[in-house]
Image (tube, grey):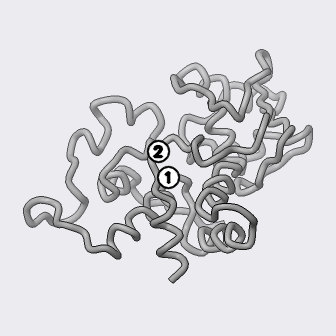
Amino acid sequence: MARYTGPVCRLCRRDGMKLFLKGTRCDTPKCGIERRDTPPGQQQGRRGKLTDYGVHLREKQKVKHYYGVLERQFRKYFQRAEATKGNTGDVLMTLLERRLDNVVHRLGFGLSRAAARQLVSHGHVTVNGRRCDVPSYLVNVGDVIRVKNRSKSLDLAKGHMAENGRQTPDFLSVTGSEIPEGIVGRLPAADDVSIPVQTQLIVELCSR
């Protein structure tokens, strides 16, 4: 699956907020948006006022950047959310939160979603005892996400956990000590997203 490989600090600067794309670096003065909070590119004074379409688009782009998905994949998530009963915006955010790379990150096994994605794609993580190297895999209630019992995998995950200072969300629980392990206690809700998102703006834009 395609992914963004360019500089990520410019994404935070474009969206005008911290998206925590570089893990713990985002909590330090080295954070790109702390050093320069203007949009990337050639500057002509201060940030101009966005049009109504621009406001809607910026909200969608912010969510795409946060979860590390591109347009085509995001559209598939939206179409699935539309076909599911319930509030489309809330269902959309639930689907994105259920991604395996996001869950691995929220458990603390990866300092950022990019690092968690790499852990998954390189085969360092199992789901219910079986190797899963698909970052977009959607977890379900009761799934057990575990780091492989081998030195390289354990060193990577434990190193990230030691450096990680963020709290595990309510829908997940970390149970392993020697071998890092997490359990999905319930499906995530829109309230579990750690950045403010106006889902109605995204729904209005994608429904046009």
- Crowding at label 2, few (<14), some or many (≥20) Cα neighbours within 10 Å? some
Q: Which tag, 2 or 1, sits closer to the chain's start?
A: 1
Q: Does residue 85 sit above or below 137 in this rendering?
A: below
Which residue does the numbered mark 1 point to in the structure image?
66
So how many labels did they put on this image? 2
Going by the numbered disc 1, the residue's amino acid type is Tyr
In the drawing, what numbered circle is on residue 16? none
Q: Position of residue 100 (x, y in %)?
A: 72, 48
Q: Which residue sits furthest top?
A: 177
x 54%, y 72%: residue: 71
Residue shown at the point (66%, 32%) measured from the top left? 107
Residue 32: image quadrant is top left
Q: Nearer the viewer, residue 10 or 15?
A: 15
**Residue drawn at (11%, 59%), measured in percent from left and top?**
46
> In this rendering, would 68 be left or right of 145?
left
Q: Quadrant of residue 93?
A: bottom right
Say which amino acid is labelled 2: Ile
Q: Secondary structure at mark 2?
A: loop
Residue 188: % across, % down: 69, 44
Marks 2 and 1 in Cβ contact (< 8 Å)? yes
Judged by depth in the image, the label closer to the viewer, 2 or 1, is 2
**Residue 102 place in picture, x, y as percent:** 64, 45
Frontmost residue, 96 versus 32: 96
In front of the other: 194 or 91: 91
**What residue occupies the far bottom of the structure in this picture?**
208
Instruction: State whether residue 140 appears in this view.
Output: yes
Question: Which of the labelled discs sits on residue 195, or is there none?
Answer: 2
Tell me the distance, in whole angstroms, between the alpha carbons under discs 2 and 1.
Answer: 9 Å
Residue 145 horizontal/vertical position (percent): 80, 36
The residue depicted at 53 percent of the width and 70 percent of the height is 203
Left or right: residue 136 compared with residue 69: right
Residue 152 seen in this snapshot: no
